[in-house]
Image (cartoon, rainbow, N blue to C red):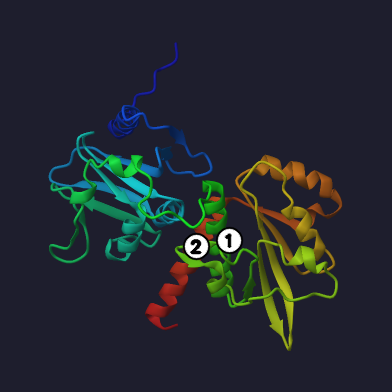
C-alpha cells in the first residue's frame, strides 16, 4: 500500500476554515485561474493563509504579486488563520495592499506578515500596527454583499486579464516604449488603464488592418520622427474558449521586427491554436502568467534600485 500523505498543521487549519465556512451555508469554490489558494466564499473572494501557534506572534510569508492579484478582484479578502480556527483575521485585501510599503520584505517581493498576540498586523516603527479588531473572526464580512456596489461586477478572469494588461503596460513604460491598450476603462490597482498608457489612440500603420490592430490587448511602440514603429504586441488569453487574439496579432506579420506574445497558463491550448497558424508559428511566443509576474516584479525592483543609487 502507498504511504498516506501527512497533512501539515497549516493545511489542517485551512481545511477547518473551509469546513467552518460551510456551516454558514456559503457556496465555496476554488478559483482555478489563480495559483494561490483562493476561494469564492459567499459574496467574496478569499485568499486563505494559515500559521501554526507561535510564541507570541504569527508569521506569514506573502508575495507581492499574490496580494496584487487578489486586491484587483471583486470584494477581496485575506483570511489569516492564527494557530487556531478561533483566531482568524479576515481583512479586506485592499487595506493590506495599501499598507504593504510599511511591511518588511526582501528583494524578491516576499513580505513578512507579522501578527501579534492581540491579532493586529505589525508595521514598521515601534508600536505601529493595523488595528484588526473589526476583522477578527468577522465571517459576516465574507457572507454579506459589498457595502459599496461595483460599477460593474467583474469575473475573476476579467480581473486577472486587466492585471496582466496593467503589468505589460508598466513594463513597457519602464523600458521607455510608448504603450497602448484598448480597454481604457479597465482598472489595475484602482487606476484606469487609460491613465497608465502613453498613447490615447492607437497609431495607424501602413501594412496593418487598423480595426484589428487597435483591438490587440497591449502594444509597445517606438517613436520615429512623427511616426510610431511597432515593437511588441501582446494578447492575454485566460479562458479556454476561442483565442481570437492570435488572429488579431497576425495583422502585424508584415512587420518582421515585431515580437508577438501570448500570455496564458494554458500551453496545450496555445499549441492547438498555433497549429492553425503553422506557417507563421515561429513568430509567436508563449509566456506563462507567473513568468510575466516575475518579470514585472524584477523590472519594478530594478527601477527602484536605479532610483536609490542614482545610476
For the residues bearing labels 1 and 2, Cβ distance under 8 angstroms = yes
| Label 2 Cα neighbours within 10 Å, binned few <14 / some 14-19 / many ≥20 | many
Label 1 Cα crowd, 10 Å radius (few <14 / some 14-19 / many 20+): many
Q: Residue 188 carries which label?
A: 2
On the image, which quarter does residue 205 sit in? Answer: bottom right
Near-viewer residue (34 or 242): 242
Residue displayed at 21% across by 37% down: 83
- Give percent across and percent down for residue 156: 51, 47
Residue 52 rendering spot, x and y as whole percentages: 23, 37
Q: What's the residue at 65%, 50% (across, down)?
A: 237
Q: Is residue 89 left or right of residue 147?
A: left
Give the position of the C terminus as an image quadrant. bottom left
Q: Where is residue 43 in the image (x, y as percent from the top left)?
A: 40, 42
Determine which of the numbered discs, if any, sits on residue 165 in the image: 1
Q: Name the quadrant of the N terminus.
A: top left
Q: Is mark 1 on a helix, strand or loop?
A: helix
Measured Cα–Cα span from mark 1 to mark 2: 8 Å
Q: Which quadrant holds residue 51?
A: top left
* SS label for mark 2: strand
Amino acid at each position: 500500500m502507498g504511504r498516506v500523505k501527512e497533512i501539515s498543521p497549516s493545511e489542517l487549519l485551512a481545511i477547518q476554515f473551509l469546513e467552518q465556512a460551510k456551516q454558514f451555508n456559503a457556496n465555496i469554490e476554488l478559483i482555478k485561474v489563480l495559483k494561490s489558494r483562493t476561494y469564492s466564499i459567499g459574496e467574496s473572494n478569499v485568499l486563505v493563509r494559515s500559521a501554526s501557534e507561535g510564541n507570541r506572534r504569527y508569521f506569514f510569508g506573502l508575495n507581492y504579486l499574490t496580494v496584487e492579484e487578489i486586491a484587483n478582484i471583486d470584494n477581496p479578502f485575506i483570511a489569516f488563520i492564527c494557530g487556531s480556527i478561533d483566531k482568524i483575521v479576515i481583512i479586506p485585501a485592499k487595506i493590506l495592499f495599501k499598507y504593504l510599503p510599511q511591511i518588511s520584505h526582501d528583494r524578491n517581493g516576499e513580505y513578512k506578515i507579522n501578527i501579534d498576540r492581540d491579532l493586529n498586523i505589525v508595521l514598521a516603527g515601534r508600536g505601529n500596527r493595523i488595528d484588526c479588531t473589526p476583522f477578527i473572526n468577522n465571517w459576516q464580512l465574507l457572507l454579506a454583499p459589498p457595502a459599496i456596489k461595483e460599477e460593474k461586477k467583474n469575473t475573476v478572469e476579467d480581473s486577472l486579464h486587466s492585471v496582466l494588461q496593467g503589468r505589460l503596460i508598466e513594463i513597457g513604460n519602464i523600458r521607455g516604449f510608448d504603450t497602448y491598450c484598448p480597454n481604457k476603462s479597465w482598472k489595475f490597482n484602482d487606476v484606469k488603464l487609460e491613465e497608465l498608457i502613453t498613447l490615447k489612440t492607437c497609431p495607424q500603420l501602413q501594412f496593418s488592418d487598423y480595426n484589428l490592430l487597435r483591438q490587440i490587448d497591449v502594444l509597445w511602440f517606438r517613436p520615429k520622427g512623427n511616426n510610431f514603429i511597432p515593437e511588441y504586441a501582446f494578447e492575454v488569453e485566460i479562458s479556454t474558449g476561442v483565442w481570437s487574439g492570435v488572429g488579431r496579432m497576425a495583422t502585424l506579420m508584415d512587420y518582421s521586427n515585431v515580437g508577438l506574445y501570448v500570455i496564458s497558463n494554458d500551453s496545450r491550448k496555445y499549441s492547438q491554436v498555433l497549429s492553425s497558424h503553422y506557417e507563421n508559428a515561429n513568430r509567436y511566443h508563449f509566456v506563462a502568467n507567473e513568468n510575466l509576474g516575475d518579470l514585472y516584479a524584477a523590472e519594478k525592483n530594478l527601477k527602484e534600485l536605479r532610483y536609490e543609487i542614482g545610476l
